[in-house]
Amino acid sequence: MTLKISVPATSANLGPGFDSVGLALNLYLTIEVLAPSQQWEIQHELGDNVPVDHDNMLIATALQVSPELTPHQIKMTSDIPLARGLGSSSSVIVAGIELANQLGQLHLSVADKLAIATKMEGHPDNIAPAILGGLVIAHSYDGDTSYVAADLPETGLLVFVPDYQLKTSESRQVLPTEFAYQEAVAASAVANVAVAALLTGDMVLAGQMMEKDRFHERYRGQFVPEFAQIRELAHAQGAYASYLSGAGPTIMIMAPLEKVAGIKAKIAAEHLSGQLLTLAVDKVGVSVAN
Ligand code: HSE
């Protein structure tokens, strides 16, 4: 049987959990490892910009982990939108590490995978839920990574995925290089309450705190003109919160399950250029089938 590796999309930050909080979603990158071959060959329909040989990020990642892997033919499919703030690049990194783990029989632990992937990505907020599933709060500093994995309280999830792309590097460029001490204390306090509310199942309070982010959204709003309008609309319909998913431009709306259809209809009526998707939490993370 063919080896198959599947990795979920992720939504990072949840407002003030900048670079440290993320959620796995039920959109997937799937790779199927076919026959061994002379060179790495990737079959995909992800666009002309995605390499079909060892330059593909999947293979480059796998070879960084284990340089002596035998080349294979690989089929790669993904329903994770590219460069939209839904963890498409993390999904490839996690899949590449798992590919090396399986083909090289490396027996990597979750902690190993998290450390390798975080080093490659720079922060663990997309990587950790892509590996573990569910809601993950993670910290990584100076090569030391710790995490707490948990269930997200019951909530509906609706994303607006704009038609345009936004590179994480571009979206990070507008962030301040320094943060005044008092400002950092205030921003951390918001994040602390947000996480505590998420972990104790209080979505109303979590939502309020998620919208009080001080770390990044106010700098990035310029890239996502629909954000203010969608937040207002979602609020009027009883949403818990909306936030910029990762570096944007996708907007995540969290709302009581019974309110999601109404919010979706209201946003659809605005005829914005983008896709509206009702999603669910992926509780599994990276998975392997033989
Ligand atoms: N926490 C990251 C950011 C996620 O907001 O820039 C995207 O990689």
Image (cartoon, rainbow, N blue to C red):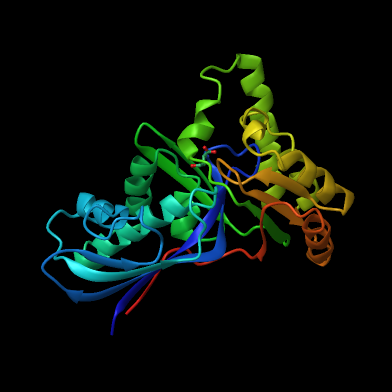
Q: Nearer the viewer, residue 19 or 149?
A: 19
Q: Position of residue 45 (x, y in %)?
A: 39, 66
In the image, residue 251 lies at what x, y percent? 66, 48
Is residue 88 or residue 224 the one in the foreground?
Answer: 224
Looking at the rendering, in which quadrant would you find the N terminus?
Answer: bottom left
User: Which percent across, then down, holds residue 265?
Assistant: 81, 62
Residue located at (34% from left, 74% from top)? 4
Task: Classify 104 as above or below 4.
Answer: above
Residue 191, above or below 283: above
Let me know if residue 200 appears in the view: no
Going by the image, does 143 lie left or right of 283?
A: left
Residue 101 pos. (x, y %): 26, 62
In the picture, the quarter occupied by the C terminus is bottom left
Q: Quadrant of residue 282?
A: bottom right
Residue 230 sits above or below residue 133 on the image? above
Q: Is residue 156 visible?
A: yes
Q: Nearer the viewer, residue 151 or 266?
A: 266
Question: Residue drawn at (46%, 34%), measured in percent from left and top?
Answer: 169
Please give the name of the residue rendered at 48% of the width and 40% of the height, measured from the top-left corner.
167
Say whether residue 73 is left or right of residue 111: left
Left or right placement of residue 55 versus residue 201 in this view? left
Instruction: Left or right? Give the position of 44 relative to 222.
Output: left
Q: Which residue is farthest right?
A: 236
